[in-house]
Image (cartoon, grey):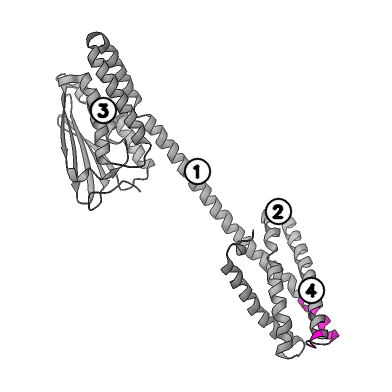
Amino acid sequence: MHPLFRRAKRIAAYAASSATFGVLLAAGLRLLTPRPWADALAFGVPAALVYGFVVLSSWWVCRANPLARGPQAIVAQLSAAARASALWTVGLALLATALSRGAHLGPDRAGILLDLGVLFVAGIPGYLLGSVVHYMVLAVEASHAAERRALESQVSAREAELRALRAQLNPHFLFNSLNSINALVGTDPEGARRMCERLGDFLRRTLALGAREAVPLGEELALVDRYLDIEQVRFGDRLRVERVVDPAMLSCQVPPLLLQPLIENAIKHGVQDVLEGGEVRLEARRAGTRLVLTVENPLDATAPARRGEGVGLENVRRRLAALGSRDARLTASRLGERFRVTLELPAGADGEGGAGG
């Protein structure tokens, strides 16, 4: 369908502009062959209206003959212009004859032939002008289509990356948990059973939260609690947790599954490496318009400094980048025998916010 026909207002506006051009055509005919305004308008306005819609046929000619075809497209346009102008001229001959015989309007036969000859010649560049406009419209549509395809490709790539990153969250933790369950089966069957139940509950909640774009901080912390319940079975008294959470922040919207990798990182590279274990501190507070999440863990003072930040922190950084969270910031630093990771996200004035780009 021609774009003009998609809206009735466009058709009305186009018809009005064609009628206006008909007035100009009538003025030109009066200069060509002197005649009263009534005669000129009775012929010029219908002629312009009809050709205005005839020119629209160049839309399909342009679609069938893109400019990339070079000379072939030019020949096709010239041929279509000649045929359209000839068809228009035949129609004008019938109109001029009807006006002359039925209403006694218009010039004599010689004047009619002169009008038709001039209009046939003028119709060809008029049609070609319509082709130029249509080629421009098609170029704009092609550009928009390319932008849509590029955007769809970016969205698909981002979704694929997010799925891949989410898939990386659980395997390492899952392997450790299964190994711990295997070790507990012989010495503490009840502990193994509890750990299996908690692991199943954690994985079920992980799947539910991971399918959403954003979740309240309260739900994210509930998932962290399920994770810590499992780790508590593994580490016992060696793992201690301190929570300092501002209740007003629990409704803040955050990307799902961001905190668990940070807590896992703190246990794996902190509590696990310290003989007597240690305390993991989790804090959630407001700082102006920001939600600040902090995770701290102990470090083995005798252990060499780690290179890089580990898979967990890198995963979180990449997920924030894939989500387009330009206002989010993740920092990590070593403070003596403690390691601190700080995640800052936008927070609304009433405690509701998000980390969208």
Determine which quarter of the picture holds residue 339: top left
Residue 146 colored in magenta in the image:
no
The spot of residue 161 in percent (x, y) is: 42, 36
In the rendered picture of this protein, how many numbered marks are placed on residues? 4
Frontmost residue, 76 versus 93: 93
Residue identified by numbered label 4: 91
Q: Residues within 10 Å of mark 3 (few under 14, many from 20)?
A: many
Q: Tell me if residue 197 comes above or below residue 106 in the rendering.
A: above
The disc, 2 or 4, on the residue closer to the chain's N-terminal end is 2
Callout in the foreground (3, 1) = 3
Task: Tell me what residue is drawn at x 16 percent, y 18 percent.
Answer: 275
Task: Tell me what residue is drawn at x 74 percent, y 57 percent.
Answer: 71
Label 4 secondary element: helix
The disc, 3 or 4, on the residue closer to the chain's N-terminal end is 4
Extreme-right residue of the structure: 109
Q: Majority secondary structure of the magenta segment? A: helix
- Name the disc covering residue 153, or none: 1
Question: What stretch of residues is rendered in magenta?
Answer: 102-120
Amino acid at the residue labelled 4? Gly
Residue identified by numbered label 2: 69
The disc, 2 or 1, on the residue closer to the chain's N-terminal end is 2
Determine which quarter of the picture holds residue 117: bottom right
Callout in the foreground (2, 4) = 4
Determine which quarter of the picture holds residue 211: top left
Q: Could one spot residue 74 in this view of the protein?
A: yes
Frontmost residue, 277 versus 184: 184
Compute the Cα span from label 3 to label 2: 63 Å
The spot of residue 65 in percent (x, y) is: 70, 55
Residue identified by numbered label 3: 227
